[in-house]
């Protein structure tokens, strides 16, 4: 499964496409140059239970570590996953 990243300078997302349709997506917005707010995560019913949301979050964390960006998870899914995964918490604001 290929996770893609799209960013327009202010908003962005990590996503999985099938054909031309996004079947999983984690949306964020930048709050300054070094702070990111995760707003929303959505995974298509066909992918439920496969850990796709976690894979999206792991891709996002890998990106923010490289860019030295801190994360504020407003999305309930991302917030819950950060709470469970101590190995990802270094990126939290």
Image (spheres, rainbow, N blue to C red):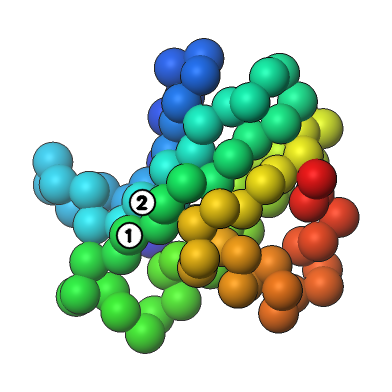
Residue 1 quadrant: bottom left
Picture residue at 56% right of the left edge, 62% below the top: 78
* 60 relative to 8 in the view: left or right: right
Residue 54 seen anywhere in this rendered image of the structure: yes
* 21 relative to 65 in the view: left or right: left
Picture residue at 19% right of the left edge, 53% below the top: 18
Kindly identify which numbered label has been placed on residue 55: none
**Mark 2 touches mark 1? (CB < 8 Å):** yes
Asked if 73 appears above or below 77 in the picture, the reply is: above
Q: Quadrant of the C terminus?
A: top right
Picture residue at 42% right of the left edge, 52% below the top: 40
Separation of residues labelled 2 and 1 (CA atoms): 5 Å
Residue 58 quadrant: bottom right
Residue 2 seen anywhere in this rendered image of the structure: no
Percent coordinates x, y for residue 61 in the rendering: 68, 50
Earlier in the chain: of badge 2 and badge 1, it is 2
Residue at the far left in the pictured view: 20
Percent coordinates x, y for residue 21 in the rendering: 15, 47
Asked if 11 appears above or below 52 in the picture, the reply is: above
Which residue bears the numbered disc 2?
Answer: 25
Q: Secondary structure at mark 2?
A: strand
Asked if 73 appears above or below 51 in the picture, the reply is: above
Which residue bears the numbered disc 1?
Answer: 42
59 or 1, which lies in front? 59
25 or 33, which lies in front? 33
Q: Secondary structure at mark 1?
A: strand
């Amino acid at each position: 499964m290929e996770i893609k990243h799209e960013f327009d300078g202010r908003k962005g997302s990590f996503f999985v496409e099938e054909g031309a349709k996004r079947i999983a997506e984690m949306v964020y917005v930048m709050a300054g140059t070094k702070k990111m707010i995760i707003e929303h995560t959505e995974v298509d019913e066909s992918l439920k239970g496969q850990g796709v949301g976690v894979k999206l979050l792991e891709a996002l964390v890998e990106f923010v570590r490289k860019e030295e960006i801190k994360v504020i998870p407003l999305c309930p899914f991302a917030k819950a996953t950060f709470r469970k995964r101590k190995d990802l918490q270094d990126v939290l604001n």
